[in-house]
Image: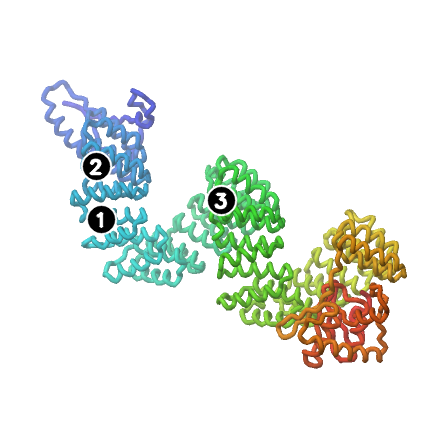
Amino acid sequence: MFKWTMKLSLFHSLQNPCLPQRLYLPLKPKTLPTQFLNSAKHIQTLAQFSTHPQTTPIQSSLETHNSISFSKLLSQCAASKSVRVGMEAHAHLIRFGLSQDSSFRNHLINIYAKSRFFGHARKLIDESPEPDLVAWSALISGYAQNGLGREAVSAFHEMHGLGVKCNEFAFPSVLKACSSSKDLRLGKQVHGVVLVTGFESDEFVANTLVVMYSKCGEFGDSRRLFDAIPERNVVSWNALFSCYVQSDFFGEAMDLFEEMVVSGIRPNEYSLSSIINACTGLGDGRRGRKIHGYIVKLGYDSDSFSANALVDMYAKAKGLEDAISVFEKIAEPDIVSWNAVIAGCVLHNCHGRALKLFRQLRGSGIRPNMFTLSSALKACAGMGFEKLGRQLHSFLIKMDTESDSYVKVGLIDMYCKCEMMTDARVLFNMMPKKDMIAWNAVISGHSQMAEDIEAVTLFPEMLREGIGFNETTLSTVLKSTASLQAVKVCEQVHALSVKTGFQSDMYVINSLLDTYGKCGQVENAVRIFEECKTEDLVAFTSMITAYAQYEQGEEALKLYVQMLVRGNKPDSFVCSSLLNACANLSAYEQGKQIHVHILKFGFLSDAFAGNSLVNMYAKCGSIDDAGRAFSEVPERGIVSWSAMIGGLAQHGHGKEALNMFNQMLGDGICPNHITLVSVLCACNHAGLVTEARKYFESMKELFGVVPREEHYACMIDLLGRAGKINEAMELVNTMPFQANASVWGSLLGAARIHKNVELGERAADMLLVLEPEKSGTHVLLANIYAAAGMWDKVAKMRRLMKNNQVKKEPGMSWIEVQDKVHTFIVGDRSHSRSREMYAKLDELLDLMHKAGYVPMVEIDLHDVEQSEKERLLRYHSEKLAVAFALIVTPPGAPIRVKKNLRVCIDCHTAFKFICKIVSREIIVRDINRFHHFKDGSCSCGDYW
């Protein structure tokens, strides 16, 4: 008799190759999984034989039975990658004396290779006297399946060197390794061996060759091999168009899919999920919907791969509701399903919905992964949920994924967008290895927080670290450079973009155009724009904005016409910039045409366009049109109210401006510092000293706005104009910063109005230090001296201007007639209709003299006879502009004139006579404000 007992020992030595001789370490017994119980029943680990000599045949029989049982067990271990059970079996085989059996050894190599225990697998091959093809195939397949292409290729070389020949099972693994390592040269060599050995007609080998050539970028060769397959099945088709999809050849993949269907091959779930990914890459929701119908028709709508691909496709093809609908029909959504729908919500800026789905995921029992949490972090960033962001950060720490660079960048981005730059920088500084995306995130964060110096200074640090950069880096740095108006930095970044080949990237081109434009380097912007020969709308917008911002409105309008000719449809930003150009030109008619375009293209509800319309009409002298535009703005924000209040202030409607301000407060809109500047200006133009004092003294308490330099300048100008010189000077002496040129300019103007020579001299002395190049200081001081009869000092000022080569800025006026702007200077006779203009002026002057007009020759500083002074005053630029308008515009039409300087006192007086004589409204916009002359009086009430 003999007795069998079960005794399993764990084989542990191969887990640690550093243990030299000790191959067997005892561990606690391990319970086998259910799928191995039946096989385990046959495992007899140790036979305790009696000394009876006739037991050998029975032992032999049992060993045969055990061999079959072990083979089955080892196959199951390989299929499920149950390496621990495989190790136990390996230990048993060694103790039972079966470890040298080639079949068992090959099974073990397969288990270890598939489970990434390559050291164990390699040791078994090295210990084998003559490893066969099965052993090498198992090792190579394990390397290839685990993405270790180079190791697989190296093993193939070694196998080939030992004279072991491949078969139809080994070739696919070798070719897969060539694909993953992109080793086209070796792939071609293997292809040659395939041809020599006659395996090219094998279905698996042929399909793997198609994939290998595709993944190595040789799509022509791949397609030729595909066409040469005698009987192509669905696997063959899937192999080719999945490679097209993975290489972003989405259109070709779609064509191939249609060809497959036409050829009569029925697609399977893998075909359909791949082709949905192609629709996703194309952003083609229409074709994606068609494939969706095909999936339902073929009964694959319950397939998880297809459903997840559909959710992703709809989310990325602007069909979020469809994505959610598909998601909700998935019986048991996995983490891929949840990730796709949550990421889709984030992509569509539905951050609240994304976070709601995230909460549902947590409640479903599925554990989120780092991709889920990355989308949740983006949603927190989009909504500014800093507390929830911190909770997610804690969750990531618990998951031990916080150190992952992808997750780290998501955290940095979240903290940046939640305006917690300190936390973002702490995380950034803790990163052991900072990649380009991390640098971009923190630079972008500083830029978004208007911490432009930090953003710009980080860029050279990034370069010193040897980190590469991309178009996002350059665009972000240029954005901060534009805010700083750092021209030199812009030029350096421009040079770097040329050197590294980014000068042709549209993001970089548009950023350069914007930065040069905002830095006042319009010529550089024009050169880049002309060199790139772009049709891009953003580039046109940047260039038009640059022209408009730096008073080249005519060029902006010309470029707009050019843009339309090239077939570009404008957006609301282009229209807004054009309206600003018209506003600067006082081009009323052109502005009305842009208004028509806004109506045509449906931008009237856009806040930018609506606010710009209010501003344009106000600055073109039509405050009534501005009021109508204001009433049509659907959601009036602070910009809308500020534009309208400022417009009323400029037009001298001080009380109306204050009424509107009170109406704004009643609507719950809190003013900002710009609104309060407009309110003080309204008080200034209307001489409302008491009201101005009230707003100025209470702005911090009522509205939380600390008075800035511009508020003090407005208040000082108002007090000076009102003759309260001492109060104005007291404010200058007590304000919390040094008086700037604007403040001293206001005091100089007050000195001129009130003929205060002492104040005028003090203010002029300060202005000559602050702005020595400005001629206006000399001219105003000379006017003060002239008004006081101090002609010797007038002469001295004129000599000073001559000696210092200070040239008086010439007065210029312009008027728009039939989409053309006409410009005039004093005594101008260059215009084609100057003879008619001068005749008209002479006619008007005769009528004016009869009505009581007397030229104010005392304001002319030229040392000439009185008759000559009268002649010079007669032909001032604004008078020539009005005369031209009377000739070329229909009777009764308003006349709109713009002047680059303050309108002179004589012209102001003359226009009150002319408007009554010709029965026309004359609207003059000078450097400070609007003057509406009508029925013999001016809207300013002579308070200017």
Residue 322 visible to an observer of this rendering = yes
Q: Tag 2: Cα neighbours inside 10 Å, few (<14), some, or many (≥20)?
A: some
Looking at the image, is mark 3 or mark 2 nearer the viewer?
Answer: 3
In terms of depth relative to the viewer, which is nearer, 759 or 202?
759
Q: What amino acid type should be assigned to the residue bearing mark 1?
A: Ala
Which callout, 1 or 2, points at the residue further toward the start of the chain?
2
Q: Relative to 523, is 834 on the left or the right?
A: right
Asked where in the image residue 845 lies, by quadrant, the reply is bottom right
In terms of depth relative to the viewer, which is nearer, 437 or 840?
840
Q: Which residue is mark 1?
A: 206
Q: Which residue is mark 2?
A: 72
Which callout, 3 or 2, points at the residue further toward the start of the chain?
2
Spot occupied by residue 869 in the image (x, y as percentages of width and height): 83, 69
Q: What amino acid type should be assigned to the residue bearing mark 2?
A: Lys
Residue 307 visible to an observer of this rendering = no
CB-based contact (under 8 Å), mark 1 and mark 3 = no
